[in-house]
Image: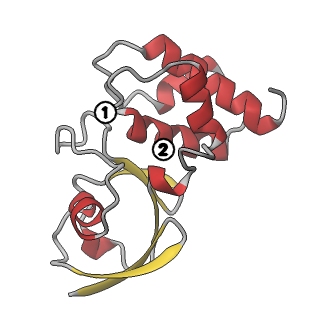
Amino acid sequence: MDIAFTVNGVARTVDAPPTASLLDVLRNRLGLMGTRYGCGLEQCGSCVVLVDGAPAHACTREIGTLAKRSVMTVEGLGTADRPHPIQQAFLDEQAGQCGYCLSGIVMSTKALLDRNPNPSRADIVTALDRHLCRCGTHQRILRAVERAASALRGAA
């Protein structure tokens, strides 16, 4: 079944079963490897992408529900040469150890800062509550989100 949707601002059509996971389509059909498989149960947050600007778990989201919708992955933010301010803040704070969970955390951060450019620490904790970082960099992640918010407001 052909399913047309937008990924990182580019119109795409994929031939996939409507029950295929968005994660499978992103990684195995479109070659976007930044979104990671973690638990497959919406419990770790490694697979979070934005669907129409809202965080969504790509591991359980069926591609058949995404016709004509917009998906943003971590590849849609910045590049290694020109990182998005959120990605730069995570680098500056050394918020990633193994980095496995970071693409999902970065995307949830994007959604948070898009709707709330000046979040409190409690707002950040709530927004990232669904993410698990087994490396224990939670304090660095919180500082990175605060740094990114400041940079995006132009106060860095």
Q: Is residue 99 above or below residue 57?
A: above
Q: Is residue 42 above or below residue 130?
A: below
Task: Look at label 1 and name its amino acid.
Answer: Tyr
Q: Quadrant of the N terminus?
A: bottom left
Q: Which mark is residue 81?
A: none
- Number of residue marks: 2
Residue nearest the viewer, comparing 133 with 56: 133
Which residue lies under the disc numbered 2?
Answer: 107
Which residue lies under the disc numbered 1?
Answer: 100
Whether label 2 touches label 1, CB < 8 Å: no
Q: Quadrant of the C terminus?
A: top right
Task: Determine crowd level at label 1: few under 14, some 14-19, many 20+ residues with C-alpha closer than 10 A.
Answer: some
Note whether residue 63 is visible.
Answer: yes
**Residue 96, image x, y percentages:** 42, 23
Q: What residue is drawn where x is 65% and y is 47%?
A: 114
Which corner quadrant of the image does residue 89 belong to?
top right
Does dot 1 land on a helix, a strand or a loop? loop
Task: Look at label 2 and name its amino acid.
Answer: Met
